[in-house]
Image (cartoon, rainbow, N blue to C red):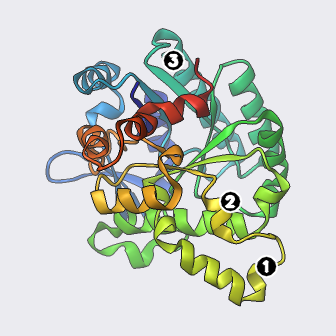
Amino acid sequence: MKIDFHNHFYPPGYLEKFEQWGRRRYEFVQDKSGLKIVKEKGARFLGITPQHVSVEQRLADMDRLGIDMEVLTLTSPSVYFSTRKRNLYLAKMSNDFFADLCQKHPRRFTAFASVPLAHPDDAIQELQRAVKDLGMKGVVLGSNVDGKHLHSKEFGPFYKEVDRMNLPIFIHPMVPAHPESFAEFVLVPLVGFCMDTTVTVAKMVFSGLFEKYRNLTLILPHLGGTLPFLFERIDAGYKSYVECQPNIPKPPSSYFKKFYYDTVSFYTPALMCTYLAVGADHMVMGSDYPHVIGDITRSVSSILELNISQEEKEKILGENAKKILKLS
């Protein structure tokens, strides 16, 4: 079974509200090819392709590559806008749309809920509704919420509820809080996203979040940013700097190795680095479809080309995802 854990869809109503409400922070522009590009503070970072809104094209691409199921999530800028009321509205509207799509195609799609984490009470309420009433399998969180990384203490009540419900969390990168240095050469999606994932997850671990809430399961995008490459360096910092030690009794890598890492890289040395760091049991297939720098074809072929056993390939392609999603 092949399950794509990292791909995105935009509900039509979301895009309409995005354009209507987002002008102060985000804007749509057209590039030379006519592709819509979302910009923030002058940094081009997201191209909206026809497949972002076409169920028919998506199913055709899945069938072409033998992908059985996709885990649908919103992508940046998620539901983190300027006002509480708007964020909750976008979350409910998006979750309702995804739930309807999953009902129509139950064997092809499942979805993770979007929640307005800037207001944890609203996030908890919407999470409960999305899971209990809509049948969603987990929650997607941006790597920062208005510049606040995910270890922030104000999010504690939300994590407590996720822990109680024993739900997986998929983290998706957001534009870094200070994107100016990434503006040149379109480095926000190429580098900035990976850096923000790395920083937010490192802070989550050092803060002791996974000691306090031990049922939390993370799925990290883009091979965890740069985390597998840095395991030993971060562990060395833990041993050397007292500032890293108060909240966790074990080296950071012992927590990192419990997370799942999606394969959105498609580069064999990077995939093998992650494989050697965490093993096939902690990797899941991802495509980043249909973003312009995603690749649904390579999402499959890059795994099949790895010099590992067929059993391990099957785990990465879908068996691990089945366990996370509690699919029979």
Mark closest to the chain's N terminus, 3 or 1 = 3
- Using the image as rendered, state which of residue 79 and residue 21 is in the foreground: 79
The relative height of residue 17 versus residue 42 in the rendered view (above or below) is above
Residue indicated by mark 2: 150
Q: Amino acid at mark 3?
A: Cys
Indicate the quadrant where residue 90 lies.
top right
Indicate the quadrant where residue 8 lies.
top left
Q: Residue at x 46, y 72 (%)?
A: 179
Whether residue 63 can be seen here: yes
Dot in front, 2 or 1: 1
Residue 86 pos. (x, y %)? 64, 41
Query: Is the N terminus in the top left, top right, bottom left or bottom right quadrant?
Result: top left
Q: Residue at x 73, y 33 (%)?
A: 127
Residue at the extreme left: 33
Q: Residues at badges 2 and 3 in contact (C-beta under 8 Å)?
A: no
How far, Cα to Cα, is label 2 from label 3? 28 Å
How far, Cα to Cα, is label 3 from label 1? 44 Å
Q: Amino acid at mark 2?
A: Leu
